[in-house]
Amino acid sequence: MKISRKWLQNYFDAPLPDAETIANAYTFHAFEIDEIQGDLLDVKVLPNRAADCLSHRGLAKELSAILNIPLKTDPLREILPASDVGTYHVPTSLAVKIEDPKKCLRYMGALVKGVKVGPSPDWLREALESVGQRSINNIVDATNYVMMNIGQPLHAFDAASLDSARDKKLAIKVRNAKEGEKITTLSGDEYELSPNIQLITDANADAPIALAGIKGGKAAELTDETTDVIVESANFDGTTTRRAAQALKLFTDASLRFQNRPSPELAAYGMREVLALITDIAGGEVAGVVDEYPAPASAPAPVSTSLARINGLLGSDFSREEVENVFKRLALPYTVVNDIFTVTPPFERTDITIPEDLVEEVGRIIGYDKIAPKELPVDNGAPDQSRFRGIERMKDQLVEQGFIEVSTQSFAPMGDVLLANPLDKNMPALRTSLESNVNDALARAKQYAPLVLAPNQKPKLFEVGTVFPKEGEYVELRMTERVPEWGDAAGTTDNLSVAKLEDYGKDYVPERYELGAYQPFSVYPFIVRDIAFWIYSAEGETPPGPDVEASKMEELIREHAGPLLVRLNLLDRFEKKGRVSYAFRLVFQSREKTLTDAEANETIEDISGALSQIGHEVR
């Protein structure tokens, strides 16, 4: 979020340090800073703190705690107008209805009459421009200012654009879009909607006027002629808003805030702030406020932790007074009895739910650099490595015998242990055996065998991994072939127990291998071609031995195959009626593109021509 040092200063009587000092304070105690430009800071607010810190107020409060500078004012701790009898009243000319309270948790609508739409005062325009916002008019700027100030998204509709019923009552309805329904947004873009997208509608006309939690519609846009406005301060479900924004590929400041689930309580503070600002800079009179709040949010539950727990997790030696000071600086209401701290989070701190959250607050505000380093405890008894050594010995033996190790995922379509929240709905269980995974790996390996294995050689795979049957998890070994030296101890269907894996090959020492230079794989597919031919020796000349003969043929083929040849293997050699036949397998592959059959065939023709020129007969 982009914030202005000058804007932050409004929250403090004491002068703030320069932008770089503020950036360092955030970096070491709260958030990373993506960029500093003069007095502008781009703060990287993480999702767990987005509910309260995507605002100048939230970031000012953090800075207050970090630098231990008191806030001059906190708009979220001031008494709401609703607590003062008669300040707000329900207008007789506006109604609000929520179709699904799970998708719209709260909707406040205010009717303001007699406003004058025009340019914003200099201070407001400059404040918005300081954080990269464009000034539009005084009403719209007021809604944007309050959102950037305390984090509550707001919107204003031209009341005259809505139809009124026979009793002259305007009506707002929050509902799901109809299949194929369309809306044109303020930017002039038209969107076709689905029922998964939530709308703000003119209930009397049953017509959309805004994408809920995302962007306003052209139909109720404010103009210079607007005199009456309906102001919206609502709370929309984060998941519904995020999915709608993704489906429409329309991401806004409002959708970013709603998808991070601010408290519905914030809507009332946003309404108070925006109405005070609108009537101050645009005139008009608040005719009343409708507040549809089907299921009011319960007060945050108290969270407790002990001084010993705090120091135990942090490795610190903080005193009770130091911890108390942290909660005071953060303005977190707390009690302490026998070194047990109980904190009641304010409504906007939706991130404080478990004891570890309080430990984190203490650590980051005091500073992790204030925790003295300590050496790790010395363990005089060496850990038992028998299980690990046994498994590694078996792996080494299998590799030396030509096996390739694979590692497959632990999830499976069926199993005895089901996952509460599977990453893949088609793999909702933990595997009970490695057999299926190894067989699947073998089928895929055969596709690439020509690149890495000798002709007619089958891939040999194995896997050692944990399986999860209902009897309890254990380690299993699976191989695609039996190992003759092991007899019937292990094979493609026999499981080896944990004890067997631990004890096997205690005196075994693996062979040493010399590794060649690493060559990266090409990302493009290969092409396989075979070529067979009869060779002739000059009359009266003694033919060379088979090894020398084959080597000469390989040299000749490589000379005419070019750089695309990545593998060459002898497939066959036989003699018949005084002649010798050779067959070779060639694998072609490019590092720049996908080869075509025509390119491979052309290379084979070049090789065939070269063989024919020296008297060999291509079969």
Image (tube, grey):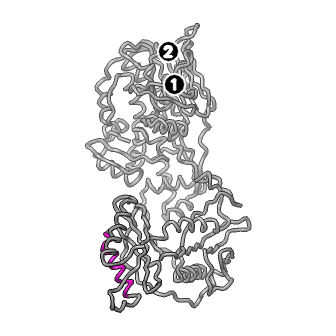
Mark 2 vs mark 1: in front: 2
Q: Is residue 547 above or below residue 409?
A: below
Residue 174 place in picture, x, y as percent: 56, 26
Q: Is residue 207 magenta?
A: no
Q: Is residue 437 above or below residue 576?
A: above
**Magenta residues (range):** 548-562
The disc placed on residue 447 is none
Q: Residues within 10 Å of mark 1 (few under 14, many from 20)?
A: some
Q: Is residue 382 visible?
A: no
Asked if the residues shown at circle 2 and circle 1 are in contact, with their CB atoms under 8 angstroms apart, the answer is no
Q: Which amino acid lies under the numbered mark 1 shown in the image of this protein?
A: Pro
Q: Which amino acid lies under the numbered mark 2 shown in the image of this protein?
A: Leu
Residue at the limit of the structure toward the top, as seen here = 166
Residue at the limit of the structure toward the right, as seen here = 471
Q: Would residue 199 appear left or right of 596 to someone viewing this image?
A: right
Residue 427 place in picture, x, y as percent: 62, 56
Q: Residues within 10 Å of mark 2 (few under 14, many from 20)?
A: many
Q: Residue at x 44, y 84 (%)?
A: 513
Q: Quadrant of the N terminus?
A: top left
The disc placed on residue 162 is 2
Q: Residue at x 38, y 55 (%)?
A: 28
Residue 116 place in picture, x, y as percent: 37, 14
Q: Quadrant of the C terminus?
A: bottom left
Residue matched to label 1: 81
**Earlier along the polypeptide chain: callout 2 or callout 1?**
1
Q: Residue at x 53, y 41 (%)?
A: 346
Q: Is residue 245 above or below residue 356?
A: above
Q: Would residue 390 appear left or right of 450 to someone viewing this image?
A: right
User: What is the secondary structure assignment of the residue under circle 1?
Assistant: helix
Q: Is residue 555 magenta?
A: yes
User: What is the secondary structure assignment of the residue under circle 2?
Assistant: loop
Residue 169 place in picture, x, y as percent: 56, 12
